[in-house]
Image: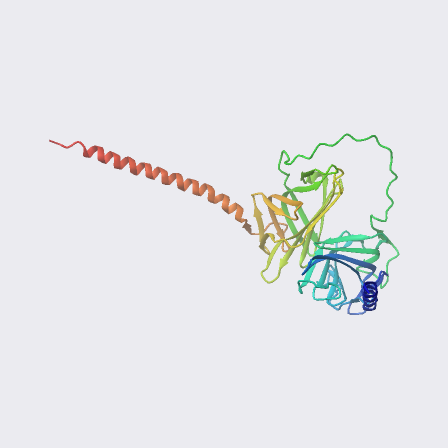
């Protein structure tokens, strides 16, 4: 009976379009009916959710019934921001947000909205909320070329992993069809043939604290409308991982501006700074904006790195729900005190002497400064110490005067 029930459920899922592995074509058109985004891929979703009986894992795929929503966009007048919104199932959607510069475009952000009240996909879920997770991606291509990746591409979002397969994607189309030229993903490129090397000596354990603070560097991100991010800061990574000998170590790494390439993208509600080292480490910071309060903030951090001595050499960490480095749009945020931002349990980012402004930057100069609370607290300490010392001097002076008056009172004139 259990096997029959499982087969019946699988049949129902197939009829509902939940289980399907074939690629599907998605097209976004402008008001004139001209295609501006085309995408052909299959997508698999793997995630965990809470039930009344504990944590449960579920896997499903993008069904053939998935459709492009009208909320998809070819972008504004300068066509710098565009998006592909795909709806499927009972209240789920996958969104690819594109940005570009003069030479390249990319899927700047991939977002997944899922409806926990969908009992077919999430049976016995303890929550009935609609949840939203997102992550930056490595999907990028040259302008007027399509992105092509036959291999699987995984995008990690909190408790969700989305795997794209056999993907062909192109935005900012010059015609209503895929370009002949293509930019291949790094997974499709053949790896160099291994060469025999002498065994390397065992590497020493990473020092828990580097000898020096990181160098402060200035970063600038510009788009079609000018500068959207101006930042000056020193960055330090704290990564905890398990080694092959089952020992746990914490590696503290300073970002060296001389060995790092900076790039980024601008959009109306998201500004991204991407730092890539010569060794392949990629650190991405993206800033969001609350339109109702007119404030910007550090919304997300993502780290992709490799540690050869780790049990799992590839290290990835992402957090898209941060609220750090906040200031009013048009102003700048400044903090001379070291700030410690916890991204995940295994990764945190230390930021030194930060001065940053996102979205509205005029003349490539920082606007009015909004100082952090930490700097204000540091100012209170010397004030409090000075006040205490002044009070102590006053007490000693009063005691001295009282004592002197009493000593004079002991001698009376005859």
Residue lying at the far front in this picture: please name it. 1
28 vs 10, nearest the viewer: 10
Task: Give the x, y percent position of residue 20.
Answer: 84, 62
Q: Residue 166 falls in which quadrant of the image?
A: bottom right
Question: Residue 370, relative to residue 64: is it above or below?
Answer: above
Relative to residue 67, is residue 334 drawn left or right?
Answer: left
Give the mark count: 0
240 vs 266, nearest the viewer: 240
Task: Give the x, y percent position of residue 338.
Answer: 58, 43
Q: Residue 117 falls in which quadrant of the image?
A: bottom right
User: Is residue 157 something one can see in this rendering?
Assistant: yes
User: Is residue 144 something one can see in this rendering?
Assistant: no
Task: Residue at 77% x, 51% y: name it.
Answer: 138
Q: Residue 70 falls in which quadrant of the image?
A: bottom right
Question: Residue 345, relative to residue 20: is it above or below?
Answer: above
Relative to residue 372, is residue 227 drawn left or right?
Answer: right
Task: Residue at 43% x, 40% y: name it.
Answer: 385
Task: Give the x, y percent position of residue 347.
Answer: 67, 45
Task: Give the x, y percent position of residue 148.
Answer: 85, 54
């Amino acid at each position: 009976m259990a096997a029959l029930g499982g087969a019946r459920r699988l049949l129902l899922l197939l009829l509902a379009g939940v289980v399907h592995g074939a690629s599907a074509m998605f097209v976004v058109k402008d008001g004139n009916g001209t295609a501006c985004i085309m995408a052909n891929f299959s997508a698999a979703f793997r995630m965990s959710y809470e039930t009344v009986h504990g944590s449960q894992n579920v896997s499903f795929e993008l069904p053939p019934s998935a459709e492009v929503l009208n909320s998809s966009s070819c972008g504004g007048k300068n066509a710098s921001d565009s998006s592909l919104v795909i709806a499927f199932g009972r209240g789920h959607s996958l969104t690819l947000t594109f940005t570009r510069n003069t030479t390249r475009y990319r899927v700047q952000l991939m977002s997944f909205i899922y409806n926990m009240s969908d009992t077919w996909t999430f049976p016995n879920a303890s929550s009935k909320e609609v949840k939203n997770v997102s992550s930056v991606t490595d999907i990028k291509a040259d302008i007027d070329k399509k992105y092509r990746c036959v291999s699987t591409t995984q995008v990690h979002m909190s408790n969700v992993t989305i795997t794209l397969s056999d993907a062909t994607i192109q935005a900012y189309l010059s015609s209503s069809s895929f370009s002949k030229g293509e930019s291949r993903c790094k997974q499709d490129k053949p790896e160099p043939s291994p060469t025999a090397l002498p065994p390397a000596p065992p590497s020493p354990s990473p020092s828990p604290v580097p000898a020096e603070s990181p160098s402060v560097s200035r970063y600038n991100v510009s788009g079609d409308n000018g500068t959207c991010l101006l930042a000056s800061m020193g960055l330090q990574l704290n990564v905890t991982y398990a080694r092959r000998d089952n020992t746990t170590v914490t590696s503290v790494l300073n970002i060296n501006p001389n060995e790092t390439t900076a790039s980024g993208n601008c959009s109306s509600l998201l500004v991204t700074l991407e730092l890539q080292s010569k060794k392949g480490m990629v650190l991405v910071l993206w800033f969001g904006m609350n339109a109702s309060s007119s404030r910007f903030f550090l919304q997300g951090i993502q780290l992709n790195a490799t540690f050869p001595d780790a049990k799992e050499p590839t290290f990835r960490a992402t957090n898209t729900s941060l609220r750090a480095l906040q200031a009013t749009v048009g102003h700048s945020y400044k903090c001379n005190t070291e700030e410690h931002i916890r991204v995940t349990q295994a990764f945190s980012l230390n930021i030194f002497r930060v001065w940053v402004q996102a979205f509205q930057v005029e003349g490539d100069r920082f606007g009015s400064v909004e100082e952090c609370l930490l700097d204000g607290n540091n100012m209170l300490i010397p004030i409090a110490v000075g006040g205490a010392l002044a009070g102590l001097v006053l007490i000693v002076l009063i005691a001295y005067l009282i004592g002197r008056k009493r000593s004079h009172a002991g001698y009376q004139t005859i």
